[in-house]
Image: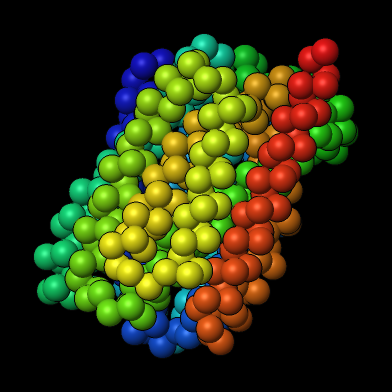
Amino acid sequence: MKRNLYLMYTTAFLQGLVFYGPVSLLFRMERGLSVGEFFFLDFLLMIIGIVTEVPWGYFADKYGYKKTLVISYSLFFLSRVALLFCHGFNDFVGQTILMAISLSGISGCDIAFLYNSCGSENTEKIFGRYRASGSFAFFIASICSYFIISKSMEFAVFLTVIAYGLSVVMICFTKDIDLEKSIDKKCISIKKCLENSKSFKHIFIFVIATTLIADISYGISINLGQLHFKGIGLEIKYLGYISAFSELLGMLSCKTYILSNKFGQYKTLKAMIVVMLICIAILIFNKSIFVSIIAIVGLSGLISMISPIVLDIKNKSISKNRATMLSVYSMVGSVASAFISIAIGFCADIYLKYAFMICFVIMGIGLYGVYLYISKEKYNEI
């Protein structure tokens, strides 16, 4: 199944070529969205994800991971095409709905596909390489964006559309996983899967906590960071370089397993989240461009580095119906974080500093949730 791994790495690379990424919020604002509307659409994205996550996982476990991924990546490609023609709130609502449906199909299914392609060994390393492939691509896209965005934001979106079209082609060349090996057909219903999840309720604490942490990290490094840098006087053409520096650290996710092996998964995870919390605190009280770059780069890079640990813990808690259960995890996380985007967007419209303060509080809650999960796990091991 090495072919599957290499094709998935290539797909992740192509999906990471988001040339307009460093100015994604500014692009939408230029097309008629307010900051509040942007975060409302983020809320809408999560709500649709909540509704469609588990049905997509069920579809994948019943009809095949490859078929699900081909459909989902195709829809994602179409959502990028639609972005070229969006002007105003209503257009972006349609584009968001299409993107939400595609993302919920990919979510969980790609990880389940990888997990079953490589077996249960070296999974953290495989997940790290998968994430690093996307980070490396975004690093390249961010460097190139300095020149591309200087020409036009629309051209950056167009190049992104081409990359996403190629990713659909790549996924078509993968070999599907034998369903009999990856699921228990006696427990294929969504109801049964949810009943099984009750035997390890404590994993939901971890799922909710890490989802909050990821949402806040991405929200700041990708969206609020753009507003922060614009507010302190940085030219937008340099945002690509900042995103590139962020991805340099993110590419280290392929080496996270080395830290985990040396210090343990839990210690490594806790230490990285504490540093992320410090980065947010810096952004609340600081207006220095140099220090802000360090904080944003730290947030973006560290969330990529903890991702392989989080994925490994989630996958090892599942014994059957992997795609469905990963979708359940994603749905639970989305329920917990659905209203965060609206609150952050509302505060950002009033005063950006308030938005950072809310992010700090939510990140702190996420850190507490991780500590709570770890303490329960250690207790169960005694």
Left or right relative to 99: residue 298 = left
298 or 317: nearer the viewer: 298
Quarter location, residue 120:
top right
Quadrant where the N terminus lies?
Answer: top left
* Rendering coords of residue 127 (x, y %): 46, 28
Q: Is residue 173 above or below residue 1?
A: below
Residue appearing at x 33%, y 78% in the figure:
232
Residue appearing at x 80%, y 28% in the figure:
376
Residue appearing at x 82%, y 13% in the figure:
382
307 or 178: nearer the viewer: 307
Quarter location, residue 359:
bottom right
Residue appearing at x 64%, y 16% in the figure:
180
Left or right relative to 343: residue 162 = left
111 or 236: nearer the viewer: 236
Q: Is residue 303 among the parts visible in the rendering?
A: yes
Q: Is residue 110 above or below residue 209?
A: above
* Rendering coords of residue 222 (x, y %): 41, 62
Left or right relative to 204: residue 346 = left
Q: Is residue 345 among the parts visible in the rendering?
A: no
* Rendering coords of residue 178 (x, y %): 56, 18
* Circle count: 0
* Rendering coords of residue 170 (x, y %): 32, 37
